Each structure stands twice: as structure tokens, then as C-alpha cells.
Image (tube, helix red, strand yellow):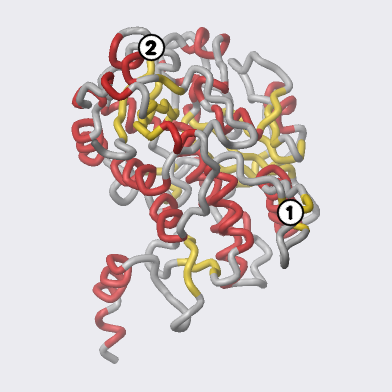
Amino acid sequence: MSAEALFLAEDPRSNMHCLVRLIPVERLRGPFSPPKADDVNQLLMAHDPEALLQAAIALGPMHLSGAHDGDLEGRCFKPSELQGGDGPKLRTPDTEQLLKECYFDPYSTPENSGGIAYRQTGRLARAAATRAATAYSFDNARDYSFADSQYRFLVEPLHDWVFARNLLSIVLRIGGLLRAKPEDKNILESAGFTYAKPKTRSQLLGMEGACYVIPIGFNPFYRKGNIIKNDAGFDANVIWPLYGSLVESRKKGLAGGAADDHLATCPDVKFLTAVVAGQAKGTFAPRESHDLINTWWYLALREGENQIDTANMLLRALDRALFEPELCYTGEPGREIAPARRPGNLLEAMWLLARDHPNRYLLTCENCGRTVLSGNQGGERRFCSGSCRAAWNKEHRGELGR
């Protein structure tokens, strides 16, 4: 039996995909171990569903009950409950919906519409989604009901993983670009943000002024089911618990305008729907008639004095949200005073690594432009992976021979 087997399914409670992770009971009650930089990089470089699942296997659960805010109600089941009929009736993965949920990658290339429309790039394609749906389907899981005393199934919304990857990617990319070009005064635009002003009353309510915006994931109101019902029944604790733990919402109804949500530590870091395009005309129209840019969720930063100040506002706000040390007396020689609080979820653990690891710096790959964590030994690295190094060398073969 695999210690932490991972499966993919569609959760009928959210009509979105979830990861189903089989873990030992003692692991469920433990703290988060510091993640490895290579595993974090694997997530940052995961730009298709298959690679995302592989990164999730390497990193382990997003939430644990032993964490300080670990509330797994409705997400933790005995094997006999999930496979025997008492839990939610998980469905077979849907390749097309899986592609939509994993579509946006912060490193996608802008196409048009003022730099806000993106196209799929790299391995983010139907073939990868099909492979993931086939290889990891919960339908193929063996019956683990005999192991109720030893194991639990954790149901983790896939949206949490996409959100964690995109949020980290966006913030680290800003840092990587600043490291490479500290004089860049248009750092947010270089990092893929678009300057936007509210055009409608609903946008004004959400944005409260001009913002720098970037898509950060699939808009869950465009999941399966009636869009209006999806709006009225939106429950972040079910659909997007990681998002729910970081964001304060000023209103529940989001259809027909921007979602007036903001990072709990800063009202100027917002999460909105359809920022630039405006809500698609006719909310009751079939979702197929809505433009792609209406089906994304956006990170929006209220405009500061300049782009550097605005970028630093995001960094400080996110740090306050993910890093909250509480000192205590340990009674241990050499570390009598030490932080008492441990990471409450995997995103906090990854942020702690990126924030404080003394032997890491931000590496921006010369080939794909991704920013990852890199060791500072052996000189400056130029590429995030061997494949990117080979691709760059092939493209610049003529230059190298001069």
C-alpha cells in the first residue's frame, strides 16, 4: 500500500475537481515539514494538470488537522466512508473541465485585448489533461476500506493547488525581475500585470479605483451547473478553502460584477472577476458565449505612487498573511526564545522557505522566464531545468559558435 497515494476526481459538492490523498492517520495529525526547494520548484514549473498532480505528490497535503488552523470537516474521510457510500459520490474526471480549471498560467503569453487575453503555452494541453484524468482517476483506486484504523482520505480542491502555484509564481516573478533589472520602473507590467480603470459601477465597487491586474485562476462561477446558482451557492470553504483562509469578502453575491474580496491583511490587494472585460452581457446566456477573459479570477493591486511601491505593498501584505510568528520560551539551551507558531498550511510552509532560506536566491530562467528558487553555490545558474538549457542552446546555436 502506498503511504500517500493520490487520485483525481470531480467533487459533486463543488462541481470542480479535487485531489483524493490517502495518508496515514499519524501524518494527518502532524505538523508541516519544511518543503524541499526542488519540490516547490516542481510546483512553480507545473503548467499542465499532469505536472501539477506530480508536484502535489512530492509536496504532500495542502492542509493537515495538526496545523494551527487545521479544520478538515467535510474533507477528511475514512476509506470505508468515501468508498462505501457514506461520503460524497466522487465522479470520474472530466478532461475538458479539468483543462478549464488549470488553464491560466502566470507565464502564459499575452495575445490581445490590451494584454489581458492569454493563450495556452508549453505542455498545458489536452493530451496532458487526458493523461492525468486516466492515470490518476479515483475510479481506479483499490478498495482501502479494510484500513479504516490506519488511513484517511483527504479531499483537496484542485483549485487550492492552482491558486498556490499562481500566487507564488506571480510574487516570485516580480522578485526575480527586480533582481535582474533593479532599475525597471515598470516592474508590474514586466511581470504580466495590466493597468486597468473601472468602467462600470460594479467594477468601481470592487476595484475602488485604478488597479494593476493579472489573472490568477479559473473563476469558479463558471464551473459546471447554472451560473446564477453557482454564484448564490458559492462557499469558499468547500470550493476554495485556501482562498477562504486568506481573503475577506464584503458581500456574498458576485454575479453581474466584480467580487469585492480583498486580502485579509490589506484592502488594496483585491481579488476580482472580469476586471477589464466587464461581466459578459447576459449572465443568463450559455457560458460558451462568454469570452474567455470573463471566466478568470483576477489579482488586483490598487495603484500606488509608482509600480515599485505597489509591488512592495503586495509583498508586505502577503507576508503578513502567510508569516505570523509568535515567540515563546522553549526551555532549550541556545534557543530559549523561538517562534511557537508553525505553518498552518502548505502555502505558508512554502512561503517560509522562499522568504527565509539563507542559501537560496531567485533564479529567472533565460529560456522560459520562470522564476524559481536556486542554490547559491557553484555560480549563477541561468536556467530552471536541463530541458530549458538544451532548448536555449539549440535556439542560440549560431550565436554560441561565434
Per the image, the residue denoted by label 2 is 87
Give neighbour class at mark 1: few <14, some 14-19, many 20+ (Cα, 10 Å).
few
Of pointers 2 and 1, the one earlier in the residue sequence: 2
In the rendered image of this protein, does residue 155 appear above or below residue 379?
above
Split into 4 quadrants, where in the image is the N terminus? Answer: top left
Foreground of the two, 139 or 270: 139
Give neighbour class at mark 2: few <14, some 14-19, many 20+ (Cα, 10 Å).
some
Locate residue 102, reporting x and y percent: 39, 36
Seen at 53% across and 45% down, the residue is: 32
Seen at 37% across and 48% down, the residue is: 58
Per the image, the residue denoted by label 1 is 330
Q: Quadrant of residue 332?
A: bottom right
Foreground of the two, 350 or 104: 350
Q: Is residue 289 visible?
A: no
Locate residue 227, reporting x and y percent: 48, 12
Q: Secondary structure at mark 1?
A: loop
